[in-house]
Amino acid sequence: MKLLKRGQNRFNIYCTPCHSRVGNGLGEIVQRGYKPAANLHDQVRTAQPISHYFYVMTHGYGAMPDYSAQLTPEDRWAVAAYIRALQLSQAATAQDVPAGEKVQSLKAIAEGEGHAEYAQPWALPTTAVQAYPHITKEGTPAMAPANPADPTIVVPASKPAPAAAK
């Protein structure tokens, strides 16, 4: 448990901005227009060996930079173990809970820890447009709404082509 708690701590610091606390790839910076992060719960990611996560944190992958300067090898293994535990938790059933253990909803936990503002059901997106609202149907990155009360997405104007060199 000590290793998983350390992994959770490091995951929450370094991974959640892109992957979110639940690992669905919809972290805060992704919601603000950064390239979509991997959903750690999709079939491809859950089939990967735990060493894959250590390797990616060490060397980077795609848009994800390496985190070898931020995370020691021990912490990278702890995060990898936490990712696997997070994946297992999202696929858990009532039969996976040991007898006598108390099970609480995320809402109850959030309220109990004084985060009532987060105590709401979190609906998962059902389509790519809902999952990545900052990407238009044409695949063009869009700007986040200037006013959160007005969910209008503004697509940035394309830059003019550079003038040909003479």
Image: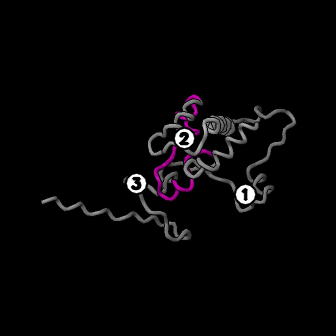
Q: Measure the C-alpha gap from mark 2 to mark 1.
A: 35 Å
Of the image marks 2 and 3, the number of the one nearer the N terminus: 2
Which marked residue is nearer to the observer: mark 2 or mark 3? 2
For label 1, the crowd category at 10 Å Cα-Cα, with few meaning under 14, some 14 to 19 and many 20 or more, is some
Quadrant location of the N terminus in the rendered image? top right
Q: Which mark is residue 62?
A: none
As drawn, which residue projects farthest toward the right?
Answer: 100
The rendered magenta stretch, by its main secondary structure, is classed as loop
Place of residue 22 in the rendered image (x, y in percent of width and height, measured from the top left): 64, 46
Point out which mark residue 68 bears.
2
The residue to which callout 1 is attached is 119
| Left or right of residue 130, residue 160 in this image | left
Residue depicted at 48% across the width and 45% down the height: 65
Q: CA distance from mark 3 to mark 1?
A: 32 Å
Assign a secondary structure to mark 2.
loop
Q: Position of residue 112 (x, y in %)?
A: 81, 55
> In terms of image quadrants, where is residue 69?
top right
Residue 72 image point, x, y percent:
61, 39
Secondary structure found at label 3: loop
User: Is the C terminus in the top left, top right, bottom left or bottom right quadrant?
Assistant: bottom left
At label 1, the amino acid type is Ala
Q: Quick one: label 2 or label 1, which is nearer the N terminus?
A: 2
- Work out how far the residue at label 2 is from the one at label 3, CA to CA, in angstroms: 36 Å
Q: Nearer the viewer, residue 115 or 90?
A: 115
Are there few (<14), some (14-19), or many (20+) residues within 10 Å of tag 3? few
Q: In the rendered view, tell whether residue 40 sits above or below residue 151.
A: above
Name the mark on residue 137. Answer: 3
Callout in the foreground (2, 1): 2
Q: Which residues are magenta?
A: 22-49
* Mark 2 residue type: Ser
